Amino acid sequence: MILWLLLTATTIQPDKAAHFGVSASINLACTQTAKVLTGSKWGSLIGCSALTILIGGAKELTDSVADKDDFKADLLGVGFSAVFLSF
């Protein structure tokens, strides 16, 4: 999927990069904090990934113009950080 985005995008818009980075950062911080508090790696990762996706979706629903590509960037950020945390 990331390869498809890179091949089809002529440039990466700063807004999309911001959505990717913020979602990845939120998921990383939430997962690491929850892991320390609960001791559960996978439970923390799944719960925080779901929470981060909900935050991104809620943000898009409250925008005056919802942009599905912003939400896609949010999902990619969560996915990237989840893969990073799974090792």
Image (cartoon, rainbow, N blue to C red):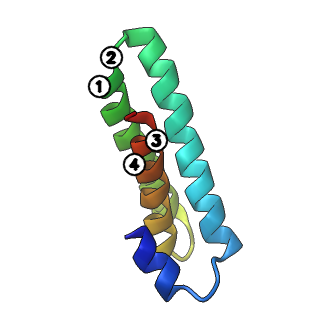
Circles 3 and 2, Cβ within 8 Å, touching? The answer is no
Q: Within 10 angstroms of label 4, few (less than 14), some, or many (20 or more) residues?
A: few
Residue 14: quadrant of the picture: bottom right
Instruction: Spot the residue most to the right.
Output: 14
Name the amino acid, label 3.
Answer: Phe
Mark 4 element type = helix
> Which-is-in-front pick, marks 3 and 2?
3
Residue 40: mark in rendering: 2
Closer-to-camera residue (86/53): 86
Q: Going by the image, does 45 lie left or right of 7?
A: left
- Name which residue lies at 49% across and 39% down: 27
- Residue picked out by circle 3: 84
Q: Nearer the viewer, residue 79 or 66?
A: 79
**Of the residues under marks 1 and 3, which one precedes in the sequence?**
1
Going from N to C along the chain, the mark reached first, 2 or 4, is: 2
Closest to the camera, between mark 2 and mark 4, is 2
Q: Quadrant of the C terminus?
A: top left
